[in-house]
Image (cartoon, rainbow, N blue to C red):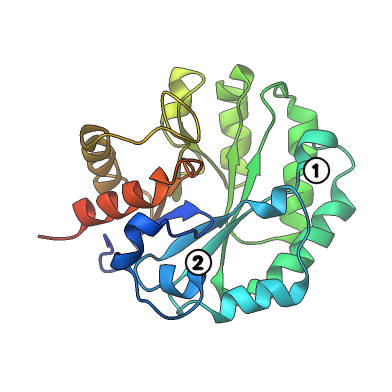
Amino acid sequence: MAQTGGRIVTRIGTAGWNIPRALASRFPESGSSLQRYATCLNAAEINSTFHRPHKPETFARWAQAVPAGFRFSVKLPRAITHEGRLLDAGRPLADFIGLICHLGDRLGPVLVQLPPSLGFDSDIAGVFFRQLRDVFEGSVVCEPRHPSWFGLEAEELLTCEQVARVAADPARVPEAASPGGWGNLAYWRLHGSPRMYYSDYSTEFLQTLSSKVSVSASSETWCIFDNTASGAALGNTLMLRDQLRPA
């Protein structure tokens, strides 16, 4: 795993922690899927929170299942981002943060993925991120998908609120392929291309990604593979991890 001295940390993982049968031999035989996964990787993205809430004890159990250096990123509920469209989010945000804080020191970034139809409105976005900052001091990453989020005004707002903009593949606009916003955190989300959630990434793509990650100036870099529908994510994750390991 590419971790160096000082403050530089690289985290590589998948959305969820499913271990396909074809890769089972690369993980310990005993333990839960999460425990086995966490022996080889240092991060995972919890996407299920987008669709439904979990009990506090569920988050606590997940935290207890992983070693001290492991971190979870957690996706905001669709009720806030897609249905509420960032409006009147103060109480829902406080409730959500109150739940995920049961991850304790295993809690990493909160992921704000926006619907493709949600354009940038400086007033709405500003209020929303300030409400989020009122209840959460940790890392925040945002994956906007409307082209209007990639202009200077949006970039300045994200930077001001210390929100990192996701580098996504496939990218809906060229700017979406590179990290943006707050520069202390870089966060890649690899959804699979050309077929989202299914396509396996080539060795050449992963080598290029490895080069980008290696020269990242951010103090913390995440690479999360979301091409889980075909089981490709974990194999891509392990290959990238191996490419980033010091020789």
In the rendered view, tell whether residue 201 sits above or below residue 132: above
**Residue with the mark numbered 1:** 80
Q: Position of residue 145 (x, y in %)?
A: 60, 26
Decide which of 182, 203 is in the foreground and name it: 203
Residue appearing at x 24%, y 47% in the figure: 214
Identified at 46% across, 70% down, the residue is 70
In the picture shown, does residue 42 fall above or below 205? below
Q: Residue flagged by tag 2: what amino acid is it?
A: Arg
The numbered mark at residue 173 is none
The disc placed on residue 71 is 2
Q: Label 2's element? A: strand
Badge 1 amino acid? Ile
Image coordinates of residue 54 in percent, x first then y, are: 76, 64
Q: Nearer the viewer, residue 139 or 92?
A: 92
At label 2, counting other C-alpha atoms closer than 10 Å, the crowd grade (few under 14, some 14-19, many 20 or more) is many
Which quarter of the image is occupied by the C terminus?
Answer: bottom left
* Position in image of residue 23 (x %, y %): 33, 58
Q: Is residue 214 among what the camera can see?
A: yes
Measured along the vertical axis of the image, is residue 1 above or below residue 57?
Answer: above
Of 116 and 191, the residue lying toward us: 191
What is the crowding at mark 1: few (fewer than 14 residues within 10 Å), some, or many (at least 20)?
many
Quarter occupied by residue 194: top left
Q: Is residue 21 left or right of residue 105?
A: left
